[in-house]
Amino acid sequence: MGYWHRSIPQPSLAARARDPLAVAIGNASLLGAGYLLLGRRPLAAVTGLVTVALVTFHTAVARSVWSETVVLLWWAALVGHGYLLADGRVCGQRSPVRGQRLVALGVAVPVLLAVGLLRLDAAGIEGAVTDARRSGDCARALTALDRVRPEHRVVDAALTVRGERTGDACRRLQLGGANLTAALTGNTLALQAGFDVLAGVLAELPGHEQMVDAVLGGFLERLPKAEPCALAALTDWLRQRPPDGSVLDRSADVVAPTAPAALTGCGDELMAAADWTQARGRYQQLLDQYPGDALTATASAGVERATVAIELATVRSLLQGPTSTQPEYCSSPARYRAAAPYRKGSNRAMIFGNDEYANRLPASWRATDAAQAVLVVCAGEESHGAAVRTCPYENKRFPEFPTYVTFHKVAIPVQVYELRTGKLVADTKVQIGGASCPRVLHYTTYYTDFGPPADVYVAASDADVRAGFRALLNR
């Protein structure tokens, strides 16, 4: 028996059966698997590079819906092109090959499933961020954004852009909130910085109004708890802030309810610290800006107390210096409205300019501080007043010719100011009497004794000094 041998050549690559669906499915993986099934390795390599370039551009550069659309169109083009390339135009055979479909599915399904699951997870993250943004909860938004991984940026770059904008907004709002917290000490520069940050988020990152409002609301809730002077400084700034039509304008709503109490409280603090000028300014501010407020009576009383304290401090400053000289007050008198009026009876006085006689007055007639004084007396140097008596005295150089000596009252020029008004109430001379013509006259000579002087003062006793000033100080 003979055998016939015939060689059956293996079909060429171009003649192999191709399954268009398998090629399309393989290309759906974006890995060029369909082209590899066709044996088109160069084409698979080129399209793979294009895919990498598009994904990189979409993920790292554009990160937008349109770039995502480009990638999607590229994916559809690969799928369609692979199907057409295997659809009998290259080879007439169209019988499906089961093995090719399984290979294609083995490559494409994991890729597509991973993409789907990642996009689903990304959508969940975006939902959580959106809910947090709507409720103004930055902490919850940042917690959700911590779940974003590099894979999410590849499959849903547009989502991550939106998330990053929210993350940027929250980080900026954290800084703004810190500035507002620092401002609660009365630091208006920090307050300005905080509002600038919030305004920047509103202008540059729209859609985060609720988050801005939440930060602002937290600050406004804590604002009334600030110290009075700090609160007064902050409400001053808020009152002067021009409205811009944003959610920040509601900060003006807290001014009227909180500023009056802050102003009076600050005035009280400044009074306790002896800063009377600033205290009066705060009380007066309330009267000027909130004339109908319930605290106007308190503010009016505060203005009066501060004014009295300022006047007393001014008078004390003008009266500084030793009592032996005239102080600045004598040339620039000032009022102290809380002083008692100059009236009948005893009027205590602060006396300057002539201690020799003023120190001989009773302590009950004199005051050591303006707070207890009624009058300020500016005394000058004593001079010879009215002549009392003239008596002869022996001249030792010329015994036969006596010297006649005239005794004069002590005349002291005085200017008397009523402390209550600062007005001059007397400009006169006090005449102090005393004993005259003693049996022996004591006098001082220099080099040669030419006899006693022709005019001398009487010998004034303490009672005489009191008598001279009594009419002035005790009406």
Image (spheres, helix red, strand yellow):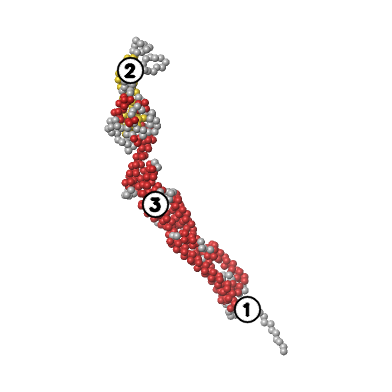
Residue labelled with disc 3: 224
Seen from the viewer's position, the closer of residues 278 and 443 is 443
Earlier residue among tags 3 and 1: 1
Q: Residue at x 32, y 36 (%)?
A: 339
Q: Are marks 1 and 2 in contact (CB under 8 Å)?
A: no
Element on which disc 1 rests: helix
Seen from the viewer's position, the closer of residues 112 and 11 is 112
Rendered image quadrant of residue 424? top left
Seen from the viewer's position, the closer of residues 450 and 200 is 450
Earlier residue among tags 1 and 2: 1
Q: Nearer the viewer, mark 3 or mark 1?
A: 3
- Mark 2 neighbour class, 10 Å CA radius: few under 14, some 14 to 19, many 20 or more: few
- The label shown at residue 438 is 2
Q: Residue furthest right?
A: 1
Identify whether 324 is placed above or below 446: below
Q: Quadrant of the C terminus?
A: top left
Q: Percent from the top left, x then y, of residue 103? A: 59, 74
Q: Percent from the top left, x then y, of residue 269? A: 39, 45
